[in-house]
Image (spheres, rainbow, N blue to C red):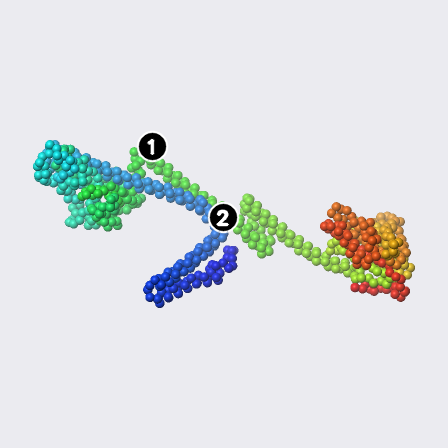
Amino acid sequence: MTAPQEPAGRASLASSRGRLFVAALVGIRILAWLVVLALPPGSAANAIDTIGSVSLLVALAILISRLVLIGKRRLLWRVRRKLILSYMFIGVVPALLIAAFFLLCGLLLFFNVSSYLVKSDLRDLAEEARFIAESSTVEVNRAGLENAQSILSRRQQTLSARYPALSLALLATGSPPCAAASAGSADASPHTAERQAEIATIATGPWRHLPPPRSLPMWIACSGFSGIVPYHDSGGEPADGRSASQRDATHLVVRGAALPDVASPRFAIVADIPVDADLRRTIRLRTGISLGDVVEILPEHGSSGTAGRSAEAGRTERTGLGLAPARGEWDSVAFLDSTDWTDGVTATAIAQIRISLAGMYDRLSSTTVRSGGRNVGQLLAVAVLVVGVLFLIIEFVALVMGLALARSITGSVHELFEGTERVRRGDFTHKIPITARDQLGELASSFNSMTASIEELLRQAEEKKRLEEELRIARRIQTSLLPRGQLRVPGLTIHAMCEPAREVGGDYYDFFPLDEHRLGILIADVSGKGTSAAFYMAELKGLMLSLTRIHRSPRQLLIEADRIIAEHLDSRSFITLIYAVLDLDARTLTYCRAGHTPLIYRTSGCSPDARTRVLAPDGLVLGLKLDQGEKFRDLLEESELSLQTGDVLVLYTDGLSEAMNADADCFGDGRLSALVDEHGHLPFDELRERILRDITAFVGDAPQHDDMTMILIRVDEAAGRAETAVGTKEDLLIC
């Protein structure tokens, strides 16, 4: 089995023109390369090199497209592969795409929720840091600055169990906006700046992440601050045991700042909760999400200050984020709002997070109602898992069923293809196995029936051809039994014709030289057509050759012929004939008619007294086997005609008179006798053509249904006895 060939002449690799075209493109590239080597650098060399590169790309494109077409043709030539690919694209690929789509949507949802949870947790932590700073500010403002150290130490110790790295610092406010706004009030002291300068920074807590701030930045309002502050520490040995790479990275601290609620606040308290390992552990316990280091800082307003420097430091730490991979966890990022402490510029801190989907889902669904020891969220997860497994099973079963169905369909198609190939090679014995009772099975059964019918038709055609060949041989043999050529008898003009309706027929005519001046004339018609009639005609010829040598009287000859024929003829067959003896000396015609068509007799040639008669003496057909031939003898009548110069005799079979048109009308003896009466003076060739032409015009498109045989005889001027001798039969037949 081979794939169909490419049409000849197409410009592709399969044709000489295609290969020559690709070779020419490659040659242009090589020539351009050689020219570029010979030319100095410049625009001309660049242009030639570009042309060569373009030609090479075109050649590669043609080669690749041709390879793709060849691969496609060889891959998709089989119907099975087409169906399988169609099923894949229609059934499997969409299902996989839908599953992948929902999986990606679920992962995206989990990633966004995890980022939101981390961001929300840190925002709540920042608000808590601000609350710690505000409550400490209220207590210090009530007890006085001289008690600030003890107050801050006590609060730090109180909260250290919850936040071990919590650090508090009291610092001078500088000139916050609220102080500037109230500078002109009556309560403002002229020595405010001096009193603020006397406030020293008080720090409690570890402060391992950063040194305590010395003053409050000018951008912080009197309402305070809460948020995430990025920082980058460098130099010195870290007190918390971090490595050098971790120390150089960008880190985060949750910071809250609060000022006393007075007209001119002199101090502010800052509470820092570093995002260290302890805080990350706390976040993981609350959310199931592991928070890593900062990956990158993206300034929102294009600032190149501290945030920009932090971003540069963050980019150097993308390969070491400090989170050890664990089974069933996914890496993602959280986008956190951060503020630079120096200038208040806001930015987005991208922090690495690691998500445990199962743990995160358990925490999100842990507050739902429980049923049977499991919460509703877990039950829903199990239900989704079961549905997913069922979906995979159904998809697998559908795939197997689709492949099996494709195999069954294409298997039947392949069997039909193999069958047609065998038939094309002439093997009609091949049968397609029928494996299913469906439409394809019925098609295979029809194909088997068709091949069997074709085989039978071929056998019949061969048999018909053999029979036709045998019939052609029989026709040649039958034709050889009839007189051949034009008969030349002194004192007579004789013309005869015989046109069988089939290859062989039952009409028969013959001439028998009886003695020197007598000639026997016979025309006969065996009932039926075809080979049986031809066989009886041959038998009749042999019988007549014998009887004409014994009997001189036509009546006696036919009586004897009926007796013999009746013993050998089939009961459903019979023979009609006219036998006449023409005496050239006496110019008489003695004849008997045994159920045959009449004899047409036209007298006196072209004279005005000429007239035409249809002669039909009594007589019964031969071979009927009635009462031992008594009826035949009683009805058989012998007649005699006196002949004159110019008389015309026409003997014919019923194929002429009974020729029928499409309306089943017969030509008739009357029309035939009228033609002989009108044109009997013409030469026999013309008379015969007129008769046949009129019969053909009358019949039209109707087929010839019977043999047509005709004998035309004209009496000529009397000659001397020596010239009128009949002689032998061989002398009569001159071709």
Q: Classify mark 2: helix, strand or loop.
A: helix
Q: Nearer the viewer, residue 211 or 724?
A: 724
Q: Residue furthest right?
A: 586
Instruction: Please tell me which residue lies in front, 434 or 308.
Output: 308
Residue 610 in the image: x percent, y percent? 87, 54
**Amino acid marked by disc 1:** Ser
Q: Which residue: 64% across, 54% down?
A: 458
At x 80%, y 50%, the residue is: 657
Residue 655: mark in rendering: none
| Gap in angstroms between the C-alphas marked 2 and 1 | 49 Å
Q: How many marks?
A: 2
Which of 447/151 is in front?
Answer: 151
> For numbered disc 1, what is the local secondary structure?
strand
Residue positioned 35% across, 63% down in the render: 45
Q: Sort mark 2 into few (<14), some (14-19) or many (20+) by Cα contacts within 10 Å.
A: some
Residue where numbered disc 1 is placed: 371
- Residue at 36% x, 38% y is 382
What type is the residue that disc 2 sits on? Answer: Arg
Residue on which the image places disc 2: 407
Q: Residues within 10 Å of mark 1 (few under 14, many from 20)?
A: few
Image side of residue 434 versus residue 463, left or right: left
Question: Is residue 642 visible in this depiction of the protein?
Answer: yes
Marks 1 and 2: in contact by CB < 8 Å? no
